[in-house]
Amino acid sequence: MGISRDEVMRIAELARLEFGEEDAARYALELDLILGYVAKLEEVDTEGKKPLTHAQELVNVMRQDEPVQGLSQDQALMNAPARKGEFFLVPRIMDNSDED
Amino acid sequence: MELYEFGVGQLAEAFEKGAASPSEALSSVLERIGELEGEVHAFLLTDEEGARKKAKEADGLWAAARKGGARPAPLAGVPYVLKDNICTNGIRTTCGSKMLEGFVPPYDATVAGKLSGSVLLGKSNMDEFAMGSSTENSAFGPTRNPWDTKAVPGGSSGGSAACVSAGFAPFALGSDTGGSIRQPASLCGVVGLKPTYGRVSRYGLVAFGSSLDQIGPFARSVEDAALVFEAISGHDPKDSTSSPRPVPDMRKACKKGVKGMRIGLPREYFAEGLDPEVKDLVMGAVEELSAGGAEIVEVSLPSSMYGLAAYYLAATAEASSNLARFDGIRYGFRAPGAKDVVSAMKKTRSHGFGDEVKRRIMLGTYVLSAGYYEAYYNKALKVRRVLKEEFDEAFGKCDAIAGPTTPEVAFRFGERTEHPLSMYMSDIYTITANLIGIPAISVPCGLSKGLPVGLQLAARAFDEETLFAAAAEVERGAGFAGRIPGRIGGASR
């Protein structure tokens, strides 16, 4: 199953990555090789097998609903690349915003 | 014998008796690091000031204990190293990535808290976000193997393995998602344990594959690894996947011997692709187990060689989701100059992540995307089920499964970076333990062409005792415990 350059661009968009032409072609080739290798999983008979998502197969681990001290606001913000007062500062989100 | 050559247990004993102090032990390892770190490059950060302060505190604790005061924690004052994907309060944690170059966690990982009486020397080098088998994917340059500085130390926890091997620290912690503790342990000639999934809290470990990741110890002897394992394991309310099962006395397990133990040899592990000298050394160690009273039985794991393919789908899928958090908004690197938030994320991620990380995010995103989920991701999880059933059946016939940790000894720099698949093959024997959550240990069993060879043992979930008993027997046969390479790189000693 070949991966096209367009497909690489589509996945990159989903993963919030961007590639130049040369890199996109290289990634297409490398992903193709890896997918070619994993295709051998087809040889394993998995008829009727339930997918195993997690080794311990735990479900809904609960604890008492008691408040505990979390990070302070300053601690939570201390690694932010940009902040404004109590907020994380990001470039604009809305296209029609004229706010700077 | 210099203090840097002392193991964990030996140091604790020396502290207890007053034969040496934590500050003296620290000075010895710091001198060793100063002499050889230029050759090895095992660290991404060293915290000499913090270490001296902590050692001084421990000096006081042990001195007070000798005067009849309370006994300190068993590892109090023992120097150690953490892999740089384990969060340390106030100490930079980079994951070997440009993405987290300036990240200073505001909290400690649970394992760091459990070792708060020990002396943290620094943070060790690793493949970026634990993705790799050689440390060549570190954004800050590779670590070199203390046994041969032209060879890789393995990865992704290569810095931790090299630290212990070179005598920089008697123990270190790493993380293992597909072999990232056992493979570098094997290549650097030290003991490395991947505990049962759920034994050790993952709180504060930067997530790669959440259903596969587990923190574990490196040490120069099986008993030291057991001591560290005991200190870091146990239930943690902050990690809902951590197990409430009690942790038995592992040191006792090391002395148990293997009489009556059944050791399974999967015929698939000794087929093509295995270096003949590695095979001979592993079989020699198996003979030691037999001589110690173990019964050697043949088992079959017909689908085990499909583990690698299943792993690269399951692990990359989980990674693509886990690494979505690195968007340049709340922490870490942010690429400058973007006009809107989506292009800021794209630029940040494209510049902040290295090649292998991007490759895996792409693969993971692809296999989870509409139209491919069933064919790839779900198929991988069904194969994972088949693997678990085959191991369950094998563990009906034996108590531990033995084989090589890696198909070959340490390879040279650049040898595999061009071909992602050839790098992945290095983990072919280690990967299944992560997929099904069982514990596995790598223990040195000899040298091939001057480079260490590791034997891997795997056991049923939560049966680390059997691993330690069998590994200690292998260690006694190989006479490798405590061994540090005589000459490292061009450094004269």
Image (cartoon, helix red, strand yellow):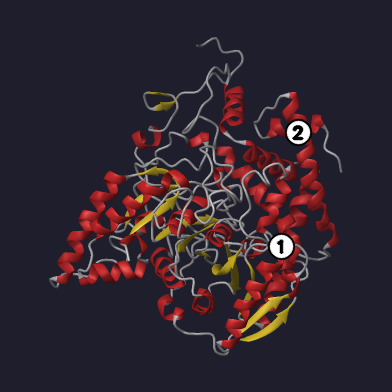
Q: Secondary structure at mark 2?
A: helix
Q: Residue B108: x, y in percent?
A: 38, 49
Crowding near the residue tagged with mark 2, few <14, some 14–19, many ≥20 C-alpha atoms within 10 Å: some
**Residue closer to the observer: B25 or B171:** B25
Residue B418 is tagged as none
Dividing the picture into quarters, in which one does residue B461 lie? bottom right
Q: Which residue is mark 2?
A: A26
Residue type for callout 1 = Arg
**Can residue B336 be seen from the camera position used here?**
yes
Vertical side of B435 occupied by B467: above or below: below
**The residue marked by circle 2 belongs to what chain?**
A
Residue at image location 40% in from the left, 55% down from the top: B110
Q: Quadrant of the N terminus of chain A?
A: top right
Residue type for callout 2 = Arg
Q: Secondary structure at mark 1?
A: helix
Q: Residue B3: x, y in percent?
A: 31, 62
**The residue marked by circle 1 belongs to what chain?**
B
In the rendered structure, the answer to whether residue B456 lies left or right of residue B49 reads right
Q: Which residue is mark 1?
A: B384
Q: Nearer the viewer's eye, disc 2 or disc 1? A: 2
**Can residue B234 be seen from the camera position used here?**
no
